[in-house]
Structure formats: structure tokens, C-alpha cells
Amino acid sequence: MRLFKFLLRAKQSKGHGIHSPFAFEIITNVLNSPYSYYAFTDIPDNLPYYAVQSKRIKKFNHLSFRLVNYCKATNILEINPGDGYNTLYIKSPSSKINYHSISNIGLYENIANHKFDAIFINIDGEAESIPSIDLLLDISHENTFWVINPINTKQSKQFCKLIVNHESVTVSFDTNNTLVVFLRKSYHKHHYFV
């Protein structure tokens, strides 16, 4: 199974065998974009608290920026923002971004009446940090995308499997450590390994 996923990931990460124009565009110009953006150099790596950033974390930060920028998301929710470093990347594509964050799932009543364009879910290893899919759907609209990171822990693997198989999720991208999900009803259901 691992060999199959590896071969599929190698093929799809370059856009080979992708028939959906939307998925091809997301894979080649967002998930695996070779281009750098101003935010990648404007946000300093030498901030005292954030000085030690692994290559994997930087890749996720850059992905967060590219997704928000490409989808033109303006109303964004971040669940469990952690150290706040990724927040800088989420907020930097536009001054019009309306950013919300919650660290405690019990605070969901504060955002219950909102609809978000993007929802970033940082799973910190605590079962309480994982929101229910029904709650996520309540605060989403058809063009909302979700970003779940990391997806390689036992709890996050189960959560991601539920999300990918949910009837409301149409297109999903597994980027090895991050899951990106789109809810667009006009697209056929498909899960890509990138």
C-alpha cells in the first residue's frame, strides 16, 4: 500500500493523470508552486520565538499563504493557532482579511453565526482540539476550503479519513503532512495524493 501511495503521489504531484482543470491548477500552481512570494521574505525567520523553523513548517506556512492568496479568502478561521507564526502567513495576502482564531473548542459559540472562506485546523495531539465535521460544515459555505495539519498522528489520521469519506467533501489533497479539502458541490468526488 505504501509503494502504491508513493508511486501515485510521484505521478500526481506533477499533475500527470489529473483530468480535472481545478485539481490540476491547485496541484501545479498552489500545492507545488515553484514560485516565491513577497511574504516569504517579508516575514522574518529570526523573530526570537520563531527562530527555529523546520523546513516542513516553512513549507506549511508557504502553502497557507498560497492557498489564501489563490482562493482570495477574506473571512478566515484558525483553530488552535499555536505559536502564531502560521497566522502571519495566513493574514499577509491581503489587508482585507478578517481573521478569527479559537484555541478552545468550547468557544465555538463565538463563531457559530459566521461563515468562513477558509478554516485552518492545527491538530496539537489533544482529542479536544479536533472539531466535529458537522460543526465545520455549519460554519462553511460551498467555496470554503479546510486545511488540516498535521495529518500523521493517530487521532488526525482517523479525523482525516472521516473528512475524506464525508459526502459533503468533494475534492481533497493529501500532501503527505497536510490535508486540503474543498466542498464545491459542482465537482466530482476525488482524493489526490500530492
Image: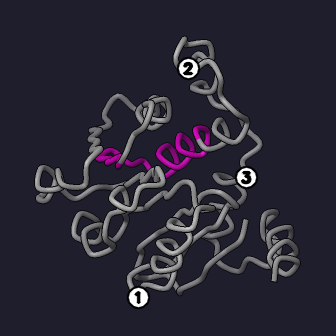
> From mark 1 to mark 3, how far is it between C-alphas?
27 Å
**Residue range highlighted in magenta:** 61-79
Q: On the image, numbered disc 1 is attached to which residue?
A: 167
Residue 133 location in percent, x, y?
Answer: 33, 73
Q: Quadrant of residue 81?
A: top left
Q: Nearer the viewer, residue 53 or 15?
A: 53
Nearer-N-terminus badge (1/2): 2
Nearer-N-terminus badge (1/3): 3
Q: Quadrant of residue 40?
A: top right
Write the residue at 29% across / 47% down.
75
Write the residue at 33% across / 47% down.
76
Callout in the foreground (3, 2): 2
Q: Report if the CB atoms under discs 1 and 3 are less than 8 Å apart.
A: no
Nearer-N-terminus badge (3/2): 3
Residue 34 location in percent, x, y?
Answer: 77, 43
Q: On the image, numbered disc 3 is attached to which residue?
A: 32
Residue 46 location in percent, x, y?
Answer: 62, 12
Which image quadrant: the N terminus? bottom right
- Report the amino acid beneath label 2: Ile
> From mark 3 to mark 2, how far is it between C-alphas?
20 Å
Which image quadrant: the C terminus? bottom right
Q: Report if the CB atoms under discs 1 and 2 are less than 8 Å apart.
A: no
Write the residue at 51% across / 75% down.
158
Q: Residues within 10 Å of mark 2 (few under 14, many from 20)?
A: few
- Report the amino acid beneath label 1: Glu
Q: Nearer the viewer, residue 183 or 70?
A: 183
Mark linked to residue 7: none
Classify mark 1: helix, strand or loop.
Answer: loop
Q: On the image, numbered disc 2 is attached to which residue?
A: 43
